[in-house]
Image (cartoon, rainbow, N blue to C red):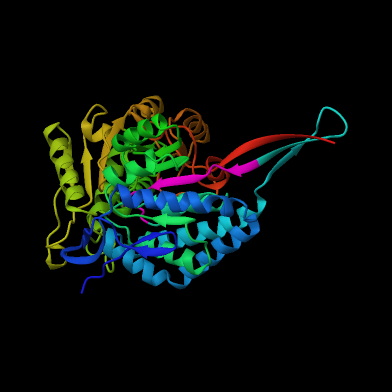
Amino acid sequence: MTETRANYVNGEWVSSESGETIDVENPANPSEIVARYQQSNAADAADAVDAAVEAQDDWATTPGPKRGRILREAGTILQERKDELTDSLVAEEGKARPEAAGEVQRAIDIFHYFAVKAADLGGTTKSPSGRQKNLYIRQEPVGVAALITPWNYPVAIPVWKLAPALAAGNTVVLKPASQAPGVVLDVAEALDEAGLPDGVFNVVTGPGSEVGSEFIENEGTDAVSFTGSSHVGEMVYEQATDAGKRVQTELGGKNPTLVTDSADPAEAAQIVANGGFGTTGQSCTGCSRAIVHEDVYDDFVAALVDRAESIDVGPGNDHEMGPQASESELKGTLDYIEIAQDEGATLVAGGGQPEGEAVEEGYFVEPTVFTDVESDMRIAQEEVFGPVVGVLKVSDFEEGLSVANDVPYGLSASIVTDDHTEANRFIDEAEAGVVKVNEKTTGLELHVPFGGFKRSSSETWREQGDAGLDFYTIEKTVYDNY
């Protein structure tokens, strides 16, 4: 019998007032329903905001070290249940098991990191201009934070928003993506067991048009953090700013790896493959454009094709690359593959759905490589969100840099080179919020800022590390005379 999971509101597990539920299927075997969740409405979301508002004052005045102890305990509980959470993530989102386990571990590490940071929060002291005066800046929580999170990293992204929000003394309402909400509810269970007071964290599942809109527009919320597509994120930003909220959005990407003539083409191909085909290409930082110097182009393409064709595709528990997360994601990728061919790109690897008993029912797609890609093609300009890499040939570093920047996005960019001067120029001139040298475009450290340029971000606030705490705090300057 399929489990029906409730919302977590004010420390209790509650069903939606709508009485309706959402079925979540296994993308590797769509006939299998993994679990049912609440198809919540605006009234459910409003109840969650009310609970967060009611809990805010007490949580804001809870000493930082005590908040940190709760976060640390929650991380420890998740560590004890890592295998269970990994199973859930593979079943709902489809990731290969090593990728899913790594994501769960990242969430655990984030809780432990911000558990320590919670004790450091408070403010700074400055020298006053006169005697008998204290001058200092206090950091205070913004209030109630509304978090709207995507399906592609269904535990890491919610936790990297949630942990700093709680560490800083905010209460939280969170709407996870309907495709993979289970692990966020597992996080709520862990926080509840760790002693988080009622109402401090609330999770409501359901559509963005109902739950998300209510979170954004409700006068009880003070800040909105959204991760998702650029199209939706831009609407969220407008909606949130119109409602007078502090807002942060992290959106799509069209991320390049520039391969220079000094690079080893086989090594570069491996870097691009890891960035482009990892997590089935469903990362906002995934490499979808390989911009390659003409002198190493042929060898690079041959190595990339070999790697793409060697990847074992199938259910995530026992294969290297899992399915796409849904039928609509698979269709979108296949549509872009057709568009690329219609525009004149040459398909040299993949391009369809794999064959075999293990993959006959799921949303599987082959790792795909195109050559003869031009920068004005849709395959080089638009986010595909599948395991598709387009290879563009350039004649020198200047052209490569220009092509790398010739997109409306600016999330992550990397260069593969043995020339330190070129690496430094790329660092200086690449229009991206994350720049890497001799490394794949994917993969982030948890203690440094993350965010994009151009249509990849609202460019208002960064996430992770101290920058993540900055979004969830507001400064009060105190002139204390005595």
Q: Is residue 21 above or below residue 415?
A: below
* Screen quadrant of the C terminus: top right
- The x and y percentages for residue 236 are 35, 36
Q: In screen coordinates, is 137 left or right of 293? A: right
Closer-to-camera residue (242/451): 242
- The x and y percentages for residue 266 are 35, 48
**What residue is rendered at 29% in x and 43% in y?**
299
* Screen quadrant of the N terminus: bottom left
Which stretch is magenta? 139-154
**What residue is rendered at 65% in x and 56% in y?**
63
- Res. 132 image quadrant: top right
- The x and y percentages for residue 159 are 45, 54
Is residue 140 a member of the stretch shown in magenta? yes
Q: Is residue 430 above or below residue 159?
A: above
Q: Is residue 341 visible?
A: yes
Is residue 436 a member of the stretch shown in magenta? no
Q: Is residue 416 above or below residue 309?
A: above
Q: Is residue 446 visible?
A: no
**What residue is rendered at 41% in x and 64% in y?**
12
Query: Please, which residue is most extreme toward the bottom here?
Result: 1
Q: Is residue 275 above or below residue 126?
A: below
Number of callouts: 0
Q: In screen coordinates, is 421 left or right of 441? A: right
- The x and y percentages for residue 378 are 22, 32
